[in-house]
Image (cartoon, grey):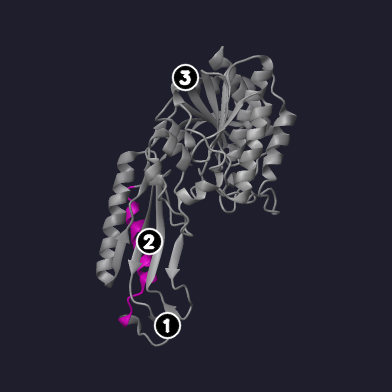
């Protein structure tokens, strides 16, 4: 099996053209956007040209299917609202190149997938979670983005292409190649990360309700200011986390929506997100209790109403030993002494797919550790090194 690095890089840059931001190499290609759908139609054409059977499932994931049984490669191709060109796309195009090279060599049998809505317009890893049975399609159809568009409404835009769900029993395993999205490989000048496990994640929304009032005439002691409640809660949660968390634990308040969001009005309501990640399920649960107890205590102390949404969660996942060992052996051959075994602090579709089959992941460096930004990038020689490791691992696993 002989991969073609030039063809691989050309395809990566072509995919980047769908939703190109005009700022660096950034892309704007959220799930089910016009750019996302156009890119998926282009991927289907590439799958067919590679000798794979193109397929779209009911939730917008696109597949290039080889003869069964086959090893499944891929990732996702939707982006954050301000996304990088390699996040997810790298794994899809690397999978395409390996599958194409395998076809040209007369084997092995390799299939490819680009899952829909990994980036979370409707929650996160939406399509792979549905496929793996983590959430029902009926339940997922009720998920809504921050504009109020439901998943059911959004997926109608690809309904004319959609067929049935793909039978997972035809796949022997899943390998997802990805950028690291962190600084460790880049800082150490290492070329490859072989993932040992993926962190667990929890994500919920908190709403505080107070009194909307005039910002100039309402005395401070008379106010029921929802935003002040949020600030107090976040500060107290940070303090309470200190004796519980580890060095690798992370938490984020990435979405904040005050109402009515006007400088001369005391905000009567605020909604904010609370997301936390760790490799330890017990610690994740401890952090949840702290969040819930703190929100309630702050609301009571300040006379605010509050609501905590149902949370979205994925448990920590360990990589399959056989697949991981094939990647590690290939990394040592390709980049001797310049690779490491490492956990993934980011969420990936492999987490969901692990419920169906053995999974493994492969990382390449992110320049300056930057991702989820227009400035996200990786040196092209590192991209090709990752592709080489992936192809050699596939050969080891299928011979």
- The residue tagged 2 is 234
Q: Nearer the viewer, residue 294 or 115?
A: 115
Classed neighbour count for the residue bearing mark 2: other residues with Cα under 10 Å, few (<14), some (14–19), many (≥20): some
Classed neighbour count for the residue bearing mark 1: other residues with Cα under 10 Å, few (<14), some (14–19), many (≥20): some
Q: Nearer the viewer, residue 353 or 25?
A: 353
First reached walking from the N terminus: tag 1 or tag 2: 1
First reached walking from the N terminus: tag 3 or tag 2: 2
Task: Find out whether residue 243 is within the magenta segment.
Answer: yes
In the rendered image, residue 367, in percent from the top left (x then y), is placed at: 63, 43
Q: Quadrant of the N terminus?
A: top right
Q: Is residue 386 visible?
A: no
Q: Nearer the viewer, residue 122 or 396?
A: 122
In the rendered image, residue 377, in percent from the top left (x then y), is placed at: 65, 43
Local secondary structure at mark 2:
helix
Q: Quadrant of the C terminus?
A: top right
Local secondary structure at mark 1:
loop
Task: Tell me where residue 66 sits by quadrant.
Answer: top right
Q: Horizontally, is 288 left or right of 361 in the view?
A: left
**What mark, if any, has residue 322 been given in the picture?**
3
- The residue tagged 1 is 215
First reached walking from the N terminus: tag 1 or tag 3: 1
Q: Which residues are magenta?
A: 222-244
């Amino acid at each position: 099996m002989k991969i073609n690095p030039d063809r691989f890089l050309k395809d990566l840059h072509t995919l980047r053209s769908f939703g190109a931001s005009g700022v660096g190499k950034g892309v704007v290609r959220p799930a089910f956007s016009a750019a996302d759908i156009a890119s998926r139609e282009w991927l289907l054409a590439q799958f067919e040209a590679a000798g794979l059977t193109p397929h779209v499932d009911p939730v917008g994931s696109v597949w290039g299917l080889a003869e069964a049984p086959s090893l499944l490669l891929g990732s996702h191709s939707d982006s954050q609202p301000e996304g990088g060109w390699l996040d997810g796309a790298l794994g899809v195009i690397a999978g395409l190149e390996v599958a194409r090279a395998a076809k040209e060599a007369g084997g092995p049998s390799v299939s490819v997938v680009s899952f829909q809505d990994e980036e979370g317009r409707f929650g996160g890893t939406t399509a792979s979670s549905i496929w793996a049975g983590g959430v029902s399609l009926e339940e997922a159809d009720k998920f809504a983005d921050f504009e109020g568009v439901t998943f059911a409404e959004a997926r109608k835009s690809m309904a004319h292409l959609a067929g049935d769900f793909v039978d997972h029993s035809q796949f022997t395993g899943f390998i997802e190649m990805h950028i690291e999205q962190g600084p460790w490989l880049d800082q150490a000048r290492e070329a490859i990360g072989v993932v040992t496990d993926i962190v667990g994640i929890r994500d919920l929304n908190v709403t505080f309700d107070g009194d909307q009032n005039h910002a100039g005439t309402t005395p401070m002691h008379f106010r029921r200011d929802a935003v002040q409640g949020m600030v107090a809660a976040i500060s107290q949660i940070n303090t309470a986390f200190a004796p519980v968390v580890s060095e690798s634990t992370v938490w984020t308040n990435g979405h904040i929506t005050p109402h009515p969001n006007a400088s001369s009005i005391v905000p009567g309501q605020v909604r904010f997100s609370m997301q936390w990640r760790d490799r330890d399920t017990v610690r994740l649960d401890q952090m949840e209790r702290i969040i819930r107890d703190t929100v309630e205590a702050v609301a009571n102390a300040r006379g605010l109403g509050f609501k905590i949404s149902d949370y979205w969660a994925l448990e920590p996942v360990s990589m399959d030993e056989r697949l991981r060992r094939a990647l590690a052996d290939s990394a040592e051959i390709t980049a001797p002494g310049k690779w490491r075994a490492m956990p993934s602090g980011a969420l990936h579709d492999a987490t969901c797919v692990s419920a169906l089959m053995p999974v493994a992941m492969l990382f390449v460096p992110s320049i300056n550790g930057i991702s989820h930004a227009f400035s996200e990038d990786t040196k092209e020689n590192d991209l090709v090194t990752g592709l080489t490791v992936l192809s050699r691992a596939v050969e080891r696993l299928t011979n």
